Image: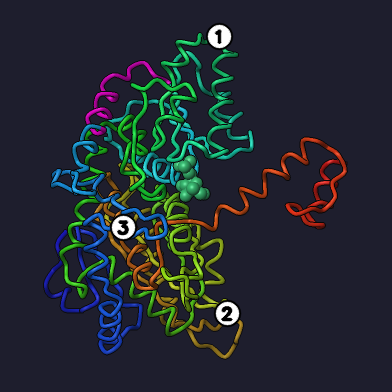
């Protein structure tokens, strides 16, 4: 879909990889835009984009590049890291993924074990593409196992057929507690179901940046798909972490997914800031934050198939930019707002009351798909209703409504973007995810935050260890260096 030049003159419409952005309801005038672009240039955004794609160590604290874009560099244009091209290794993994797709016949169940960035991306993609009526599908049941509570595990083990199940353990570090515990439980289930040692070895696969740990766990070397420490977990769906996409929908579909992402990368690197979609989206948020001190941000895809998208974005945004200090350790005035969302129209019947009349102004990204989502006789009419609701909500939020009754008054001036995808297929899904990845890292650059580490998730993990020991021992617990008085009392409650 290319933009009609007459519409383009509106100055609120932008287009990349056939995805249209309309920021008309942001209420940003030409003077403010000028100063926003000047601010982006002062923050050396163009230099950041160059460094990101050139493999410079933009993840300063861990002294690493963030080269996830190399994973969707289908042209195999060399990407140098310490003088060595990473593309031969990336291509070799593509070759192995394709080989595996051709080899897997007669598999009824795949249990994908992983959490956070090793879960959200493939889970979202499998859900988002399932609605496509003519999509090639291998018909496997794709089970996603993330949480340590055994409800999900029990549900999956009840449905899966052990003799025709394959298990993919996905963990960049291969030390994540939830993942390794769940993997052990699935191996135990395979054993209990009568599978021999060698059958279990053949059924286990791993995707990891820690190959020795995967081998140590008992995964055969041939069944390990590597990725690298220069890929952040939440940016990793483009690596073999996205294996379920290829296995379920075919390697060509996986490549289409990568191609959509690559198209946005190319736009992000080459378009001037004034026409650059990820940059404009980031700047609309920055404007609302600086001008109106917004604290939250909502993303509402008007597509049920994208219901996992807000969860994926929550990790991407908040784990990347939910920080209080900048790259130099100095306090920042602004960083990532709280991100939430779910699919429209369902969201309208949940928290839209607050979006319209709550005390807080919450900017929204609405995402709409031009084409209906099925071939059912009702599809066109239902889709029209869906789109009319999406457009109406944005209008109501922006303009509000004044009445004599304060209870029925809508304050208005609630900003939103509208993104329009031509359709929801692998290409546009890849483009959408890449658009938001590049928006997230743009925001990091504007706030001078390192978007590629996540030190804040460590403390809780460390503290859980002595608490777990205390819950296991069942002895009466006293407060000590690791466990404070309130938590000690709570442990004693559970142990009583
Ligand atoms: O929650 C922290 C985190 O490290 C995320 O960044 C990551 O996506 C997730 O855990 C899973 O990590 P891994 O892939 O190493 O198991």
Contact flag, marks 2 and 3 (Cβ < 8 Å): no
Labels 2, 3: front one: 3
* Gap between marks 2 and 1 measured at Cα: 60 Å
Query: Residue 319 appears at what percent x and percent y?
Result: 47, 57
Residue at the location (26% across, 44% down)?
Answer: 71
Residue at the location (23% across, 46% down)?
Answer: 72
Dot 1 or dot 3, earlier in sequence: 3
Give the label on residue 20, or none.
none
- Say which quadrant the N terminus sits in: bottom left
Q: Which residues are magenta?
A: 93-108
Q: How many marks?
A: 3
Q: Would you place residue 198 above or below residue 360 in this image?
A: above
Q: Main secondary structure of the magenta part?
A: helix
The residue closer to the viewer here, 293 or 463, is 463
Residue at the location (33% across, 17% down)?
Answer: 105
Labels 1, 3: front one: 3
* Residue marked by disc 1: 194
């Amino acid at each position: 879909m290319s933009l009609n030049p007459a519409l383009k003159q509106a100055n609120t419409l932008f287009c990349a990889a056939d995805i249209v952005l309309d920021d008309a309801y942001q209420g940003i005038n030409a003077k403010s835009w000028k100063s926003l672009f000047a601010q982006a240039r002062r923050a050396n955004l163009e230099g950041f984009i160059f460094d990101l794609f050139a493999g410079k160590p933009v993840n300063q604290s861990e002294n690493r590049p963030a080269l996830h874009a190399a994973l969707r560099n289908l042209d195999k244009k060399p990407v140098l890291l310490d003088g060595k091209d990473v593309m031969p290794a990336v291509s070799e993994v593509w070759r192995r993924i394709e080989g595996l797709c051709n080899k897997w016949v007669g598999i009824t169940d795949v249990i994908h074990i992983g959490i956070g960035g090793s879960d959200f991306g493939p889970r979202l993609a499998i859900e988002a593409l399932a609605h496509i009526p003519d999509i090639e599908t291998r018909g496997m049941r794709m089970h996603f196992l993330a949480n340590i509570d055994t409800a999900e595990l029990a549900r999956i083990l009840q449905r899966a057929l052990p003799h025709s199940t394959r298990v993919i353990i996905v963990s960049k570090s291969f030390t994540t507690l939830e993942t390794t515990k769940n993997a052990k439980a699935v191996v135990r289930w395979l054993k209990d179901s009568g599978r021999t040692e060698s059958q279990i070895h053949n059924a286990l696969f791993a995707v990891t940046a820690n190959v020795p740990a995967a081998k140590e766990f008992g995964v055969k070397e041939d069944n390990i798909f590597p990725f690298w420490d220069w890929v952040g977990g939440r940016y990793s769906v483009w690596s073999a972490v996205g294996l379920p996409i290829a296995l379920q929908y075919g390697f060509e579909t996986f490549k289409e997914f990568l191609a959509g992402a690559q198209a946005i990368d190319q736009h992000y690197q080459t378009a001037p800031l004034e026409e650059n979609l990820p940059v404009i989206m980031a700047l609309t948020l920055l404007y609302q934050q600086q001008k109106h001190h917004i604290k939250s941000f909502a993303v509402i895809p008007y597509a049920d198939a994208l219901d996992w998208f807000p969860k994926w974005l929550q990790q991407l945004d908040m784990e990347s930019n939910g920080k209080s200090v900048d790259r130099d350790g100095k306090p920042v005035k602004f960083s990532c707002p709280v991100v939430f969302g779910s699919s429209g129209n369902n969201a309208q019947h949940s928290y839209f009351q607050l979006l319209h009349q709550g005390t807080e102004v919450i900017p929204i990204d609405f995402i709409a798909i031009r084409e209906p989502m099925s071939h059912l006789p009702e599809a066109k009419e239902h889709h029209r209703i869906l789109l009319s609701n999406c457009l109406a909500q944005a209008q109501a939020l922006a303009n509000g409504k004044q009445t004599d009754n304060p209870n029925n008054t809508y304050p208005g001036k609630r900003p939103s973007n509208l993104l329009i995808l031509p359709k929801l297929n692998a290409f546009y899904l890849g483009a959408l995810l890449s658009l938001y990845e590049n928006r997230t890292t743009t925001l990091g650059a504007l706030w001078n935050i390192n978007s590629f580490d996540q030190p804040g998730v460590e403390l809780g993990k460390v503290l859980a260890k002595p608490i777990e020991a205390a819950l296991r021992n069942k002895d009466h617990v006293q407060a000590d260096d690791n466990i404070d008085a309130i938590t000690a009392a709570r442990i004693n409650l559970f142990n009583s």
